[in-house]
Image (spheres, coloured by chain):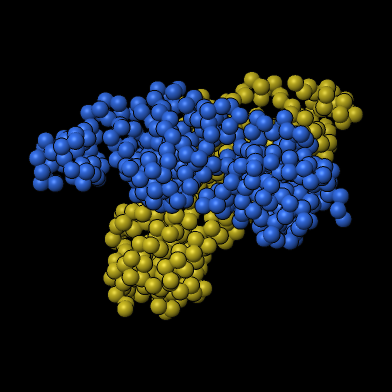
Chain colours: A yellow, B blue
Amino acid sequence: MVTIKDIANRLGVSVSTVSKGLTGASDISENLRQLVLDTAIEMGYKSKKMKKEEHKKLCLFVENMEYSSSNQFGYDIVLGFKQSAYRANWNVTVTPVTPEFQMKEKYDTYMLKNGFSGAFILGLTLHDPWIEQFADTTVPTVLFDNYIPKNSNVCYIGTDSYEGIDLAVDHLSRLGHRRIAFMNGTPYSMISKQRRQAYITALQNRGLPVDESLIAHGYYLAESAKYHVPDFIEMGATAILCGSDLIASGVITECQAHGLSVPGDISVIGYDDLPISSFLNPPLTTIRQDRVELGKCAYTSLSASIDHVSISRTLLHPQLITRSSTAPCRVS
Amino acid sequence: MVTIKDIANRLGVSVSTVSKGLTGASDISENLRQLVLDTAIEMGYKSKKMKKEEHKKLCLFVENMEYSSSNQFGYDIVLGFKQSAYRANWNVTVTPVTPEFQMKEKYDTYMLKNGFSGAFILGLTLHDPWIEQFADTTVPTVLFDNYIPKNSNVCYIGTDSYEGIDLAVDHLSRLGHRRIAFMNGTPYSMISKQRRQAYITALQNRGLPVDESLIAHGYYLAESAKYHVPDFIEMGATAILCGSDLIASGVITECQAHGLSVPGDISVIGYDDLPISSFLNPPLTTIRQDRVELGKCAYTSLSASIDHVSISRTLLHPQLITRSSTAPCRVS
């Protein structure tokens, strides 16, 4: 077991300096504090607080995702994770993060200082400062919709993007649609890249044309529809596949504002199956992600990682929910 | 709840005919028996035996894989699965299967007749008769190293092939090897296809030449080495990456028979980390698959599927185990 003295010996500083570094006292320099923490992590040091609380505290970081009400995408994921974690007597701290927050403190340092045994992390983009650090973190970590190769401490959890997009394109192409536009989520996201690739592959597998002018980013915002839907209509789209139900709700409104009937003139299909989907006018056909189960599976994978079983990825099957926003194509 | 009478009404036959079909009595035709069973499955019928034993019986099918002793690849997978299943009070029946066995009876029919709630299936090739049937099976099913898209009842479990091959190629390329041969497993296997693609990608990512004459199938047999190693040597290979430790053991023997020192003249790297790896001469550098955990994760996924949580895939991280069969490349 590594002691404070071992760290002091390694660094050639006094025990009290190490102690100050670990507790975050203000009378040592920031550089020295970071060096002490880095060395403690490297040597596998555990504080009394950590040992006492070991297997007790998990952190759930959230960025770019709403989760405070049951209408919102993150709500059920957080719920499912907490349900599973509480059953196994873990405390879960939900911590919103920003790029600035990540710049302030290294991921491993934050986890050590706060005595967390592992984390489940939602909504980070490829730009986020911590993403690079996950390549060699020693902390058990589960990422929603992000994949870090070859670090046995990090697991990717999500819904199979290829299956989801293929289900949607398959449904539309069986209805006779050939000009299927795609309003993807945000750029700089692994999932958007996967879905874009899946969309292109799904069209090609069915002999449908790929037309870059039918692809746009909707940023998971309903408002984004007005920037792209008019172009899609002009380019002859008879169906619009959306990266989220929120985007789809904006797309339906925008189509109707252009005097088009959904699904009479144009079919719209969402992604996620949020509670709002069945209340839209018309009720939305969508690709369901089982968010409670995503949260539960995230806990299962994190728990495995803490027990030194290293899962690379766990993906759920999506499901096509057929409602009234899709119909046979009228254009021949 | 579907009754025998419901099935009889649907088919327009008597209750006793349905009953005979379900129990496998000999005085109805094979065609009628199959029709009764197919209809029962389609309607979601559960026999008294199944209801009584529900959540009690799982089947573990094995083909093309040795599992009777701890030296063999399948042993720990079967062990891990049983350990987890027994803890949850399931009975597990291990059933060896062949293509002939699969031809005799449909998968769903076999499962219904024998009262199994789900199955974990090891070692099937892409040729196997049941593979096609998995596309629309209604039985919770976990496949080792096989992936069936878009059936929410079927889960793929395995070790991440891309990471595994990349770890091996990375290790060899850091040692200066540029002519890395690949002795893959069997053809007609999803994993062999994945590994082949991963090998090519890994070479390309490092600017190493891809040479088809350095790729062969070793069929997971040590004996296969003598058919390919002489060619590899002649083609200037300085390292041979093998699809299993068994293949690697044959490759080492064959290299030595040609007067080459391993790793002095040629490096050899295995796959799996079977117990034999550390006893080979020289001890084998290999890519570890955690087989006990594969079995346990298979149970977790199967259990989720039985509870209507549909996991598409769960992949474990592989691990590079460095022993003495790899060394810096001498050829400049």
Task: Please give the count of numbered marks on the rendered protein.
Answer: 0
Judge from the rendering whether residue A155 lies leftward or rightward of residue B205; answer left or right: left
Q: Position of residue A48 (x, y in %)?
A: 69, 21
- Residue B158 showing in the rendered view: yes
Q: Which residue appears at 61% of the width and 29% of the height?
A: B71
- Asked whether the viewer can see residue A272, the reply is no
Judged left or right of residue A247, residue B9 is left
Q: Give above or below for B326 relative to B192.
A: above
Q: Nearer the viewer, residue B191 or A251?
A: B191
Q: Quadrant of the C terminus of chain A?
A: bottom left
Q: Quadrant of the N terminus of chain A?
A: top right
Quadrant hosting residue A180: bottom left
Quarter assignment of residue A139: top right
The residue located at (40%, 22%) in the rendering is: B89
Q: Position of residue B220 (x, y in %)?
A: 60, 43
Identify which residue is drawn at 71% across, 53% down: B181
Q: Where residue A262 appears, x then y in whole percent? A: 31, 68
Residue A10 position in % (x across, y down) = 86, 29
Spot the residue most to the right. Answer: A12
The quadrant in which residue B27 appears is: top left
Q: Residue at x 55, y 52 (%)?
A: B187
